[in-house]
Image (tube, rainbow, N blue to C red):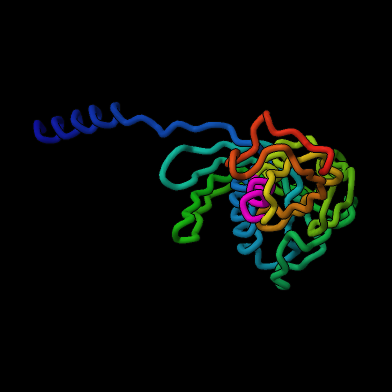
């Protein structure tokens, strides 16, 4: 009995020292969260032998665990579409069934993403219901189309900052240009995000010889 007791005590000691990896809540609009949900939903649809595919309705909660590979805990709702599982149509291209006929569901998934090997490991539990009395589809969106996005969005600002930096770096103009107005921003949901942004830039008083990048001193000139 003694060797067994020593082994058990050692196991208890080492297990008590183990600490879980820290985690943090993620924005449900984060492209990495979308990839995790996409992997989970593809797995769920792929395991269905008959019936219709389900499409994402809304991401309710997302949490990411720190580590060498992306690990996510996601809670999301799904809505039955008109695409049969046998068609193998990407769920993003499927239209929701009329709410009076459609089934809905809520899924909780843990997704381990390995970007280097482009693989994912999904464990999840989905509960499907035929009672849609509490589900109200506010809009029947075209899932593969571009939809308006606020021009005040931080995502738009970050994209334009990089775009203007790239323009100033590659252009043959002697002066730096800066953003004047964002006229329109639209976003498309695919396996990630695509953006269409219409904006206006004008020439500043900062020459490339003296300024490697835009600073608060750079102001639009009358020649812009």
Residue located 82% across and 42% down the image = 182
The answer to whether 202 appears left or right of 42 in the picture is right
User: Is residue 148 a member of the stretch shown in magenta?
Assistant: no
The answer to whether 134 appears left or right of 204 in the picture is right
Camera-side residue: 20 or 15?
20
Residue 113: where, in percent of width, then height?
50, 52
Residue located 79% across and 35% down the image = 152
Report which quarter residue 172 is drawn in.
bottom right
Is residue 76 visible in the rendered image? The answer is no
Report which quarter residue 80 is drawn in.
bottom right
Residues rendered magenta in the picture: 162-171
Total number of numbered discs in the rendering: 0
Relative to 216, residue 51 above or below: below
Is residue 112 visible in the rendered image? The answer is yes
Residue 145: where, in percent of width, then height?
82, 57
Q: Residue furthest left?
A: 2
Q: Quadrant of the C terminus?
A: top right
Camera-side residue: 63 or 79?
63
Relative to 110, residue 86 above or below: below
Relative to 5, residue 193 above or below: below
Residue 158: where, in percent of width, then height?
67, 41
Q: Quadrant of the N terminus?
A: top left
Residue located 82% across and 50% down the image = 198
Report which quarter residue 73 is drawn in.
top right
Mostly what secondary structure, the magenta segment? helix
Residue located 88% across and 51% down the image = 140
Residue 127: where, in percent of width, then height?
67, 46
């Amino acid at each position: 009995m003694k060797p067994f007791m020593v082994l058990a005590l050692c196991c208890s000691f080492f297990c008590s020292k183990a600490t879980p990896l820290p985690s943090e809540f993620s924005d449900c609009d984060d492209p990495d969260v979308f990839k995790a949900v996409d992997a989970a939903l593809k797995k769920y649809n792929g395991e269905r032998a008959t019936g219709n595919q389900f499409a994402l309705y809304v991401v309710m909660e997302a949490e990411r665990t720190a580590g060498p590979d992306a690990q996510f805990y996601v809670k999301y709702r799904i809505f039955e579409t008109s695409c049969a599982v046998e068609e193998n149509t990407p769920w993003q291209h499927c239209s929701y069934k009329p709410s009076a006929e459609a089934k809905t569901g809520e899924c909780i998934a843990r997704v381990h993403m390995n970007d280097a090997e482009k693989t994912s490991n999904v464990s999840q539990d989905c509960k499907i219901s035929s009672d849609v009395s509490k589900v109200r589809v506010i809009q029947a969106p075209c899932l593969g189309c571009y939809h308006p996005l606020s021009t005040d969005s931080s995502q738009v600002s970050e994209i334009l900052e990089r775009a203007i930096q790239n323009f100033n770096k590659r252009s043959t103009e002697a002066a730096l240009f800066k953003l004047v107005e964002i006229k329109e921003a639209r976003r498309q949901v695919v396996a990630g995000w695509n953006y269409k942004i219409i904006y206006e830039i004008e020439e500043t008083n900062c020459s490339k010889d003296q300024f490697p990048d835009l600073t608060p001193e750079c102001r639009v000139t009358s020649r812009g």
